[in-house]
Amino acid sequence: MEKVYSQDYEKIFEFAESSTNGLSYAEAKKRLETNGKNTFIETKKPNLLMRFFSQFKDVLIIVLLISSIISFVITCIDQTWSELFDVFFILAVVIFNAIIGLVQESKSDKALEELKNMTKSYSTVLRNGKISRIKSEDIVVGDVVVLEAGDIVPADLRLFECASLQIEESALTGESIAIEKSIETIESENLPLGDCINMAFMGSVVAYGRGKGVVVATGMNTEMGKIASALHEQKEEATPLTKRMKKTSIIITFAILVFAVMIFAVDMIKGNPFLASFMLAVAVAVSAIPEGLPACLTITMANGVKTMSNKNAIVKKLPAVETLGSTQVICSDKTGTLTLNRMTIKKVFTFDDSYEEINSVGDVNQTVLDIKNSLVLNEKDEEQAPEIYKFIKNNRNMFSLMQCMLLCNDVQSKFEEDNILSIGDPTEVALVRFGYTFGYSKEYMEGKYKRKNEIPFASERKLMTTINEVEGENIVFTKGAIDNILTRCSRILINGKIERLTEAHKQKIFEQNFEFADNALRVLGFAYKKADTNIRKYTSENTENDLIFIGLVGMIDPPRAEVKDAIKTCKQAGITTIMITGDHKDTAFAIARELEIASSPDQVITGKELDVLSDQDYAMVVDKYKVYARVNPEHKVKIVKALKSKDNIVAMTGDGVNDAPSIKAADIGVGMGITGTDVTKNAADIILTDDNFATIVGAVQEGRRIYSNILKIFQFFVGTNIAEALLVLIFKCVLGWDFFTPALILWINVVSDSFVGLALGFEQSEKNIMKEKPKRTSGSFFSGNSGKMLFYTSFVVMLLVTSNILIAKFLFNLDGVAVTTVAFLTLCFCEHFHSFDFKSETESIFNKSLFKNKTLNVAYLVSVILTISIVLIPIPLFQNAFGIKNINIYAWLICFGMAFLIVPFTELYKLVLRHNTVKRKNLKRIPMQNEQKKAEI
């Protein structure tokens, strides 16, 4: 049934074939069997075997597997069984890489399972007209649900009874303030969920009052279920790293194939047999693949995942750890992510000077433990109470205000295991927490000043009143909307004395009210008086009049204390933070201005204004807006897609179900582990276990470190292979000299280089890593300065090794095996020294802590020892397989000496790069300076 909110609830009962007495047990059972349980359909997870094989999707891995199979077939045909070592070695590397990825993903899945609340929720319903408690998953359409404060709404309901009912719907709409509900029919088209005041939606929480509603939708048919269903329609997109690796792998694969064809063609031209030439081409091509690269990249990302988990961020998939480091825009839900999701009093006003001191002393964010230590729970505590407690008690204005806050209040609150447990309307909870801050507990105040009677809150009056016994007299305490309070006040409390309320006083109160409202504070007024002793039954008409105005308070869901610094760090890092919320425009802008997300109201747009813009028109102006207010879930997806259309890497954070579709649509989805719904967690790539936006900054820094290290590893491995390919092509194909056997190249790629290559993944962040703009992730790893440095150093390595080959052959007159050894040692030592050059892409290694990376230091020593050992130790298996032998001391010296030259050559390149960077910055600065001069003139 469409637009339930626009139908009378009598018609809804006809549609649901139910009544105010609910369903019978038999009918409910029948409907449950027909329509299924009131739960969401979960995406079926692939089994262990499928997840294992999914690790082999990378192009480079596929090429390695195909090459290994071809090598195995050729080896079997030619019966050169010694070559099987190469085949099985490559397969071992590939399988090892897959196991690492599988284990890490399994760890993440386990961590997420531990976050889930495994307890089954229960709800109160009417069955056969009698109250029953049943599992929420057994609720069906037509059931009548009874709601009370603290209940979680189990399905979508059309309300037909309300008694001061207020429901908090932030998980669905993003609005932090509880919505006052009604049973009246709403005549409107396309009403936002937040304005459907005669409806209660699945997943929302009853904050105040009580009510009844008939179930109109369950499970996947609820508003929350529709969002969950939309997630299945979102296609799983590859991460920027995966896309870039795919492009890079294709380039490497193409280059290797061209290289293999050239070797095959040259060998055939020389008159060698077809099969021998083909075997040679395949063997050398397999050896030219950087076999150690995939494993090193996987281990580097796994290490980053472990580091993030220690910093309260669980990464579900390895490539996501790098994507966050490339993020250019973070779209953040406001409620619970940027803010505390807790209404908090920010300002207090009374007609004396005490409020100035209260506003300066009151720290509403102080820890629960601090509050507990200063809380007054009995008369003995009053003697040892903090000074601020005594100050308030001795000040009539502030004490009367505190009494009214805590006594005219229906919140159920207590301390339990160092936690404040408060059930009730978020506004009233804020009043109770404010009292706690100064040592005043609601429990003690209510115990000391007993409630005698009450006039409940009603939307028509927008007031609530209680009558409490204070020092032997019945006192009326009233709170509510400032306009409604003032119309019922005739007196005012000024400096502890009661005076007549004048127009000047009212003007002052309204000015203060407007000031609070300009800061998007929700304002409540408070008043009191002595109760009329002749009244037997208290009503609004005979009680809420001739009141004495005490003061007013302004409250808001405040930003988290650490978020402002986190956003400032994001700005320095070139990352734009965008706020998306279901709150009203003024509230959203006030928070955004305080957090320095937005500086002008022109940067704020609402969901309705967004609906007017087509996707094309909106994409043209998307960069203008920093705050989105009063939005629905579909708006969030539209925002993310528009930002992505401008080639931005977009991260989306949130905790509510309303955030889930946009989280999945973003390049990187960040869910909240504590307050986040299961739907949101399943859609996210990264889960923050502390629900703290500031944790994202640490995760971004870690992501940037990982991306930087991945780039270093790639340059290191591929640079080595390019040098090897050039050496083989020149000496084998052109000159006919066979210095590098496939086994020798495989040793260099997998053993000698892998240790130092992997160690580069443990490099710490460079000091200015969060002051640089995000690196563009389009194209391959060969693009930009990285590609230039890679080809430059590869060419230098090739020249250094070639020089030593020529020196060994023509100057020292060494034989072929000795020359091969010299070439092998020079290449290995060159790469070992070169690994320290990759500590920074631009900075000199002498400006960094050269030996700070202990893993690299150990890896360097291990690689050097292994390289020297297979030459010095006379093991026939190695020396025969690799075609090497021990050489004289002079040859050893030229190997070390020539290899070390890679360091000054690289330093020279970095010097030129830094000079060009400074030059470009100066050229950019000149036009800006000219513009400034023109402006001054």
Image: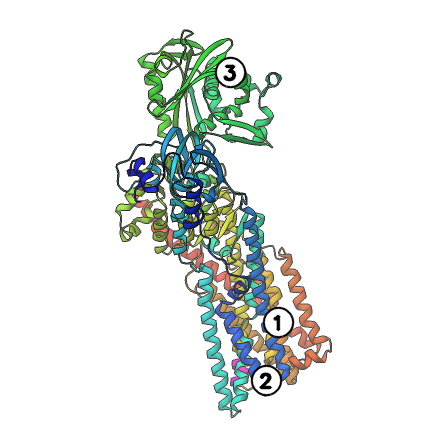
Let me know if residue 823 appears in the view: no
Mark 3 crowd level (few <14, some 14–19, many ≥20, 10 Å Cα): some
**Residue 348 forms part of the magenta stretch:** no
Q: Position of residue 613 (x, y in %)?
A: 27, 48
Whichever of labels 1 and 2 marks the residue nearer the N terminus, that label is 2
The residue beneath circle 1 is 828
If the image is split into quadrants, where does the C terminus sit? top left
Name the image quarter holding residue 774: bottom left
Q: Magenta stretch: dominant SS?
A: helix
Q: Residue farthest to the front? A: 26
Taking the spot 56% from the left edge, 61% from the top edge, the residue there is 102
Residue 713 higher or lower than 357, as above or below = below
* 395 or 736, nearer to the observer: 395
Say what amino acid the circle numbered 1 marks: Cys
Helix, strand or loop for disc 3: loop
Whichever of labels 3 and 1 marks the residue nearer the N terminus, that label is 3
Left or right, 784 with respect to 282, comes to left
Residue 509 higher or lower than 937, as above or below = above
**Which residues are the magenta region?**
727-734
Q: Are marks 1 and 2 in contact (CB under 8 Å)?
A: no
Q: How far apart in space, not on screen, are marks 3 and 1 (Cα)?
A: 85 Å
Q: How far apart in space, not on screen, are marks 1 and 2 (Cα)?
A: 31 Å
Q: Residue farthest to the top? A: 534
The residue beneath circle 2 is 76
Say what amino acid the circle numbered 3 marks: Lys
The residue beneath circle 3 is 450
Taking the spot 36% from the left edge, 28% from the top edge, the residue there is 517
